[in-house]
Amino acid sequence: MAVQPEQVLEDNLVTQLVTLGYQVAPITDEKSLLANLKQQLEKLNGLKVKLSDNEFKQVLNALSKGSVFEKAKTLRDRLQVNRDDGSALYIQFLADDWHKNQFQVTQQVTVEGRYQNRYDVTILVNGLPLVQIELKRRGLELKEAFNQVNRYQRHSYWASYGLFQYVQTFVISNGVNTKYYANNKNQSFKQTFYWADEENTRYSELTQFADTFLQREQLATLLQKYIVLNETDRILMVMRPYQIYATENIVERVVERNEIAATGQRTENFNGYIWHTTGSGKTLTSFKTAQILTGLSEVHKVVFVVDRKDLDYQTSKEFNGFAKGCVDSTDNTNLLVNQFTDAPVAAGKVNEHRNTKLIVTTIQKLNNAINHKRYLSRMGKLKDKSIVFIFDECHRSQFGDTHQRIISFFNNHQMFGFTGTPIFVDNATSKASRKTTTKDLFDECLHKYTIVDAIKDENVLKFSIEYVGRYKQIGSDLESANEMDIDVEDIDTKELLESSVRLEKITDYIIANHNRKTHSKTFTGMFCVSSIETLVKYYDLFQAKKVAGEHNLRIATIFSYSANEEDPDANGFTTSDIEDEELTIAAEPKAAYSTGNKDSNVHSHSRDKLEQYIGDYNAMFETSYTTKDSKLFYNYYNDISKKVRERKVDILLVVNMFLTGFDSKPLNTLYVDKNLKHHGLIQAFSRTNRILNEQKSQGNIISFRNLKKATDDALTLFSNKDAKETVIMPPYHDFVRLFNEALERMQVIAPDVESVDDLRDEEQELEFVKAFRELIRLKNVLSTFADFDFNDVELDEQGFEDYKSKYLDLYDKVKTDTSKEKVSILEEVDFELELIQRDEVNVRYILQLLALLKGADNDKDYEYQYKSIMQLLGGTPELRSKKELIEQFIQENLNNLSSSEEVMDEFDSFWEQAKVKAVDEICQEESLVSGSFKALVDKMIYTNEEPLREDIVATMEKAPSVLQRKKVIPRLTEKVKSFVSTFYGGM
């Protein structure tokens, strides 16, 4: 049976959309697109008098302005048009009532931009292209459609009035698999999503997807409610199906309760909680829920409640991104009361009220507001108001007296919780007299999305768990080795676990393996230990070994030196009652030192150590934090979380802090030397499994304790008994087998390295690219195992590097030919170069090899080292652009040097001359102003962003015509990027 052509897939989809109520629009180019837009806007706005050319020109001018983000705002706003008769008309582009919107479908619209592009299937709502569908025939990989959209974004979506920048969501499909994602050109294929029903049953086949996702009411709801405009990053985000179902279930619960309350009936048990696994985007879900609830007239206030230690820099940034200005991260309870009571903004401005319907606060401040006498007269007026409370990470914040105070104070409240790890009977450790489970506190689970669901949907990563450390007791002596036989580790004595020999061996193991686990520090790690006492020992070991020159890892730490730290949430569950605002992420300075505190000496010592470690941090990052001031300490907490996210800290050493509620996508490795269980274990492990890019293939867990049974028990509790097959990566030898099988498939296409050059056409080249890319992916995983050795697989390291060079040659062939009009079929293939970045190999490293080359004793050594350097240059993407120049330096300069010590200085001189020559050549060839060109290069290096079109034009001696710009600007852009890559990248 013949493979279904792409055109048939496209035609079938259009036919299906017609049955769903879409009108076919005969649009082929921009002219017909604009004519149709005018008609649809007149229809939507009920205009009896049609828009004149002048009036429609005003509309187009307004629509053409701004970025994708700004256009998304325009879409949801009304536009004032000055009519020819002097009156004002307000045009809307999207109606609140979905029935009033006009839904059309068209195909093969041609737009002329940098190149002429034809788009597959376009859904128009009121004449604007709001959904773009790109299809590939069955059998092709879905990522090709994703890359095609990216190419259109570069080439033509911006052209003319830029109407295709109004696309809110893209749909990509090869018939068998279908995904959707927001119009955000900076995201990767990892941020594309499957559609599913409420039970998380996936609709991957195109006809299933169209019947549900593209059903007109569903699509209108998505466009109106579930496209999120992130103000902080100025990007569009689209919610995933489970997020939408959770939001709708909470909103429905609130509406139902208010309807029953209006009849005078009792409204008990209308609370609920959402169980969405850690890393699945609960913050976005809960905020969208809160935002929608603020639109209900029956609701007086929506209060989003977090624990104070979660309201750090990044969290505040995210919250304000969804609802600008809603977060007050100060410790001033009076400001919170002002928000509750809509107090005047400032004294003397009686009419200027806050009118804050959405409040974001900490549970500590909320407790103060309803518990302290000074606030009761003002807060008492809210007792009977309809207030909805949404609790983030409710498995931690809602067990204790504060919960009872809230429900006792507010008579007309509803409470909803979000958690990735609910408290069940099995993992509850509270006193029997208290409510102990999430269900006890929040009633029913309104929606569930477990870690198994998230891994299946590729929304979080699997875990690779390695157990390290076998311990035996011989007489009275303790020995340890760098292997673990988890069946015999039954010794759990404090003497063994805290022995200096063991701690030093673990420290050495981390130093030896951290680069491997984090892909040469492309990612970061966290190390959680059992106590502050042990943390101090580990930190001092790392520092001593750093001073001794054994490593250059940037180690940072934070912990509480109060008794709170020893009540470990991470180990299981803690029910610390929140009595007042003095419960902080670290003990307040005075609290730990009262003479009545039996542990005051321990705490004093801990505080001194923490002050010393913060001093190390200050020296490393030129900051001035301290434990002696609570505000400065809190700022330290925020800054250290920021530095971890920015990959400026290699390993964060903690006891309990940061093991829950902390999100950092670049964090991929957790070292564990403490006992974890139940939700504490899942929460801690989940710090590592956030999706980032292709290179981050799993979360690495390196456990120096036997947590296998605890892991199995936790996965069974929070998903099902078979969860570990889905959640935990296969063992090392399974990946060895998979690598060898992938190698066999690749060698059917290219039996040896030389045969890659003999591939007869792009179709065969494409098959080789796909086959070798799979080999790279598997090697990427294998390289994180401490046991990895090329002797275990059927391709030696040299052979792998040789194939990789051919692979990169094909990449260069496609990506560097900017003169072609025809698009190569390889252009849509993602070469996933991040998998083969060699961050430790830069120009300075090459110069060290050149020094060795200069010092070679004989011709044989010289040839061997020369070949090795050339292979490194050819096999490292960042250095390939420098290969020709470095080879020139070797041929022209190396022999003239008297010693290897002169290589560095001579190369610097050569490099500067080559840079000046390259600038002169580019400016002469393209008639550019030298000073303007250099300024543009400086700006690119500073901002790390591509040049804007107007920046390119500003470097030219004579600005080109509009027609010339289409060819000149892309060519110059590539030349500037190539110059920066060659002379500044990887230096």
Image (tube, grey):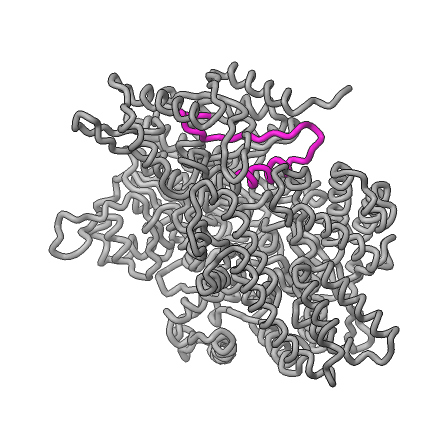
Between 211 and 448, which is closer to the camera in this rendering? 211
Q: Is residue 758 left or right of residue 150?
A: right
Q: Is residue 909 above or below residue 243?
A: below
- Residue 640, percent from left and from top: 49, 66
Q: Is residue 679 left or right of residue 516?
A: left
- Residue 205, percent from left and from top: 63, 26
| Count of marks, rendered view | 0
- Residue 322, percent from left and from top: 39, 46
Q: Is residue 639 above or below residue 276?
A: below
Residue lying at the far top of the rendered structure: 19
* Image quarter hosting the N terminus: top right
* Image quarter hosting the C terminus: bottom right
Q: Is residue 112 left or right of residue 707?
A: left
Between 752 and 886, which is closer to the camera in this rendering? 886
Residues in magenta, as a range: 124-152
Q: Is residue 246 above or below residue 582?
A: above
Q: Is residue 617 magenta?
A: no
Between 783 and 167, which is closer to the camera in this rendering? 167
Residue 867 seen in this snapshot: yes
Residue at the (84%, 56%) spot, across then down? 799
- Residue 215, percent from left and from top: 49, 22
Residue at the (27%, 28%) spot, across then down? 55
Residue at the (31%, 31%) spot, across then down? 57
Residue 202 seen in this snapshot: no
Q: Is residue 131 magenta?
A: yes
Q: Is residue 612 above or below residue 565?
A: below
Q: Is residue 367 left or right of residue 28?
A: left
